[in-house]
Amino acid sequence: MSHALDAASLDQLFRTARSYNAFSGEVSDDTLRQLYDLLKFGPTQANTTPARFVFVKSAEAKAKLGPALDEGNYAKTMAAPVTVIIGRDEDFHEKLPFLFPHTDAKAWFDGPRENRFKPALRNASLQAGYLIVAARALGLDAGPMTGFNAAKVDEAFFAGTAIKSDILVNLGHGDPASIFPRSPRLGFDEAARIL
């Protein structure tokens, strides 16, 4: 039976966690494997799991990524221990006979690739959120961003595939001096209803 996490865990995952603009430290390959092994269990529609992840760590890989970054994201991304490129596989349905074997879910998504855009984007976006929460659970901080030229990222990292980039996430140990005061959030009555 599931139980509620303690207050310290909820703080680490949500209440005191922040999106950082500067990072330090090292992130081991083993930690990145642990990160994926957590986020892969987050639910997606029919277990489509369309997100694909490129963990950019080396100087060579950062040099490939650099030209695609908006000016405001360049320095912090080059300095981050790891930048994750999260893309969506628009031919994700090809893996459904393995991922969702109890029915012919592949047939639900057959046809023109543009018809798979929405489910690929929606479910890869869910997986991006899982990545951030999993990173926080492992003691890392995250800095998600969309300020980049997706066509350049796709050319550099996904050429010849059905994968399109959606979001970048810097990972490491966040520098508290790099964040602004927390912005307000809507209260329950402004954002939600119970019917």
Image (spheres, rainbow, N blue to C red):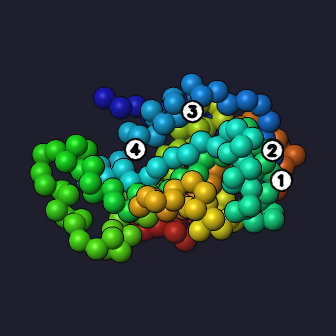
Q: Are marks 3 and 1 in contact (CB under 8 Å)?
A: no
Q: Which tag is nearer the camera, tag 4 or tag 2?
A: 2
The numbered mark, 4 or 2, whose residue comes first in the sequence reads: 4
Q: Which residue is mark 3?
A: 32
Residue at disc 3, secondary structure: helix
Q: Earlier in the sequence, mark 3 or mark 2?
A: 3
Q: Which residue is mark 1?
A: 75
Residue at image point 45% right, 32% down:
37
Q: Secondary structure at mark 1?
A: helix
CA–CA distance in space, label 3 to label 1: 22 Å
Label 2 sits on a secondary structure element that is helix
Q: Amino acid at mark 4?
A: Gly
Question: In the picture, residue 166 is in which quadrant?
Answer: bottom right
Q: CA distance from mark 4 to mark 3?
A: 16 Å
Residue 144, position as x, y percentages in the image: 65, 54
Q: Which residue is mark 4?
A: 42
